[in-house]
Image (cartoon, rainbow, N blue to C red):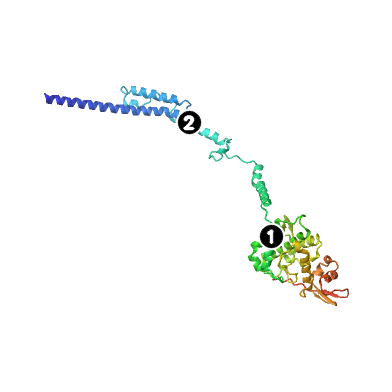
Amino acid sequence: MTKIALTSIVSIFLSISILMISCQNKAETAEKNSDDNTEVITSPIENDVPEDSDSVEVKEEVITEEDNEKEVEVSPKEATQPTSPPKKSPSTIKDESVKKIEKTKDVVTNEPTSNPSNNTSTNQPKVAEAPKQKEVKEKIIPKVVKEVEKKIIKKPFSHDIWDGLLRKYVSGTGVVNYAGFKRDKAKLQQYLDLLADNSPTSSMSKNDQIAYWINAYNAFTVDLIVDNYPISSILKLDGGKTWYVKRITIGGKKYALNDIEKNILIGRFKEARIHFAVNCAAQSCPPLRNRAWKGSSLNSDLDRASKAFIKNNKHNQISKKKAKLSRIFDWYKGDFGNVNTFINKYSNRSITGKTKVSFNEYNWDLNE
């Protein structure tokens, strides 16, 4: 009796277990199908981004409850079919939603923003600049900035750089070391740039202006030789007409060496003594001074240079009966007025009307 009862209990227990497992499987299947149906129905709704999100949640709960109530009556295969199919297929609704979103993006992308802080955004549109705005931005503004900087950060002008170069590369007798100048070309160019940016003004004294132009003439002549060095004579350049080539820029204006000598130093200032201060890089030229010219000592320095040149037997041989003079007194006699009077002012030997005057051949070999 006990054995029969035990067997019956075990059988009942097994039956109950089988029944419970079966029910559990059915419940899981129904729950899974219910979830699938909810996703199919709600997915298009999410893509359309409805304003009232609470209504979506209510619909999802109702559909889920209805599916759960039909679990017992509907077979697993039937449970996978949606009870309320949408009027449009999910793919159609999804495509329409995507198109709406893309259309919205296009509108936002093409619409200029009014918020300056969003200028760095990747979606920020590029607004085409008007031709005048582009010209102002690319041409006019940089030019104005450059001019302003030039006036504000203006280098102080002096002849100190040139003075240092002359002391270093020119001997007391005027022999020029052009190879040394060439090695120091950067410093020479620095001085030339200062000359170009600091043209003489009416506020400068007459002597300072004359000193400026003498230094400019000599520095640009040395630079001309340096740029073509080694060279045997300045006459090798520009067919012997290099003094007439406008290659010098000062204050935005172009000059030739002849412009500085004839039009400014002689024409404007009427100063004949400058012929013994400017140097043409030749052996027969008055020697290049190994100091920069300065307005403060200009008169005494010009007198000294004139006297030294006239008394130098290499350039002038003077006696009472005969005088053999430099060609400078022949080429530029109009600048000196009366040549005899000018020479007598600086010479120990006087020239009279009875003195036989002739002129030496000019040696154009380089003064090195």
Number of other residues with Cα within 10 Å of mark 1, as a class: few under 14, some 14 to 19, many 20 or more: many
Residue 324 lies, with reference to residue 295, above or below; the image says: below
Closer to the camera in the image, 143 or 80: 143
Residue 27's spot in the image, x, y percent? 31, 26
Q: Quadrant of residue 30?
A: top left
Farthest residue in the right direction? 353
Number of other residues with Cα within 10 Å of mark 2, as a class: few under 14, some 14 to 19, many 20 or more: some
Farthest residue in the left direction? 1
Label 1 – label 2 distance at C-alpha: 73 Å
Left or right of residue 140: residue 78: left
The kind of secondary structure element at disc 2 is helix
Q: Is residue 42 visible?
A: yes
Left or right of residue 7: residue 130: right
Number of labels in the image equals 2
Q: Which residue is mark 2?
A: 97
Q: Which residue is mark 1?
A: 192
